Image (spheres, rainbow, N blue to C red):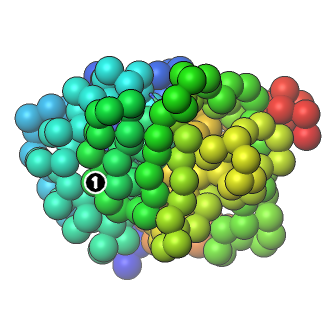
């Protein structure tokens, strides 16, 4: 049965919010408001319990290595089981940059191993020379329920190289930019409704179509059934992000 309120849980919004990743929440809120869909945002930071059944979408933004290290233990001990339970019942779990890294098995920082929550089969390793993959990026994604491949455009800046394991599928294929590791041509990860990507921007204001895809999926609606909005500004933002990436 479809629901009329999108219930979002933002994980560590105080620590995992680089490049204005919180803008992703604002965009979801506005697109719900404009359609008369309710929007509930709950923050869960260090020490907070998470109810796996109380939210339709769990969101983990990007962060500096230091901030990721601060959250990682709490994420593992307090939130790993509820997040697995939520993902198992079909809730969306969306991780951006530092977020995708913590959705995997672990993030290797030199001799330190930061634990991930193992929702997806991937590991991330910081480059030995400390070099970063930085720049505008565009990827092609083919998502179930949409009429064909679409483009996501954004900005990436990560020292970690993410390697997908055999059980993982990428979110998309790199058109321009570096992607997960700078060589594989893969970007992000997708397993059912668990989605990870390196795209900041923030991601959703630059790709409103993807915000609607997430919103509809979270509410168990067909994306094409959402009320159309006046997206002239959003379309211009998307076109500008694509141009910046060179596609
Ligand atoms: N700290 C991570 C890295 O550098 C993620 C950075 C980010 O979220 N932008 O790889």
Quadrant in the picture for residue 10: top left
Q: Residue 174, how many percent across, how many down?
A: 77, 49
Is 217 in front, or is 231? 217
Q: Is residue 202 visible?
A: no
Q: Residue at position x 58%, y 67% from top?
A: 169
Residue 58, x across and y down, in percent = 34, 50
Residue 44: percent from left, percent from top? 20, 37
Residue 195 in the image: above or below residue 219: above
Q: Secondary structure at mark 1?
A: loop
Quadrant occupied by the N terminus: bottom left
Would residue 186 appear left or right of 75 to someone viewing this image?
A: right
Res 66 quadrant in image: top left
Residue 71, given in percent of the width and then of the height, sits at 23, 33
Residue for badge 1: 117
At a point 71% along the width and 53% down the height, the residue shown is 184
- Label 1 neighbour load within 10 Å: few <14, some 14-19, many 20+: many
Task: Work out which quarter of the rendered image holds the C terminus and state it.
Answer: top right
Q: State the residue lying farthest toward the bottom.
A: 1
Residue at position x 68%, y 25% in the image: 134
Please name whichever residue, 96 or 215, is drawn nearer the observer in this view of the structure: 96
Name the image quarter holding residue 240.
Answer: top right
């Amino acid at each position: 049965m479809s629901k009329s309120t999108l219930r979002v849980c933002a994980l560590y919004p105080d620590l995992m919010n680089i490049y204005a990743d919180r803008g992703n929440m604002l965009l979801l809120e506005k697109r719900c408001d404009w359609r008369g869909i309710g929007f509930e945002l709950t923050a869960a930071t260090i020490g907070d319990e998470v109810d796996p059944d109380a939210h339709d979408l769990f969101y983990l933004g990007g962060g500096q290595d230091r901030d990721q290290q601060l959250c990682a233990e709490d994420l593992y001990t307090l939130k790993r089981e509820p997040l697995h339970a939520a993902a198992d019942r079909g809730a969306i779990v969306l991780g951006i940059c530092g977020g995708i890294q913590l959705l995997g098995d672990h993030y290797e920082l030199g001799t330190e191993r930061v634990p991930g929550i193992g929702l997806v089969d991937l590991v991330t390793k910081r480059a030995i020379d400390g070099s970063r993959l930085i720049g505008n990026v565009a990827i092609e994604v083919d998502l179930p329920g949409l009429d064909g491949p679409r483009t996501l455009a954004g900005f990436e800046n990560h020292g970690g190289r993410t390697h997908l394991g055999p059980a993982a599928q990428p979110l998309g294929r790199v058109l321009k930019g570096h992607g997960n590791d700078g060589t594989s041509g893969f970007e992000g990860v997708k397993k059912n409704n668990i989605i990870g990507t390196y795209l900041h921007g923030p991601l959703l204001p630059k790709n409103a179509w993807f915000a609607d895809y997430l919103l509809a999926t979270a509410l168990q609606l067909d994306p094409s059934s959402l009320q159309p909005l006046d997206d002239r500004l959003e379309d211009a933002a998307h076109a500008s992000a694509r141009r910046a990436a060179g596609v």
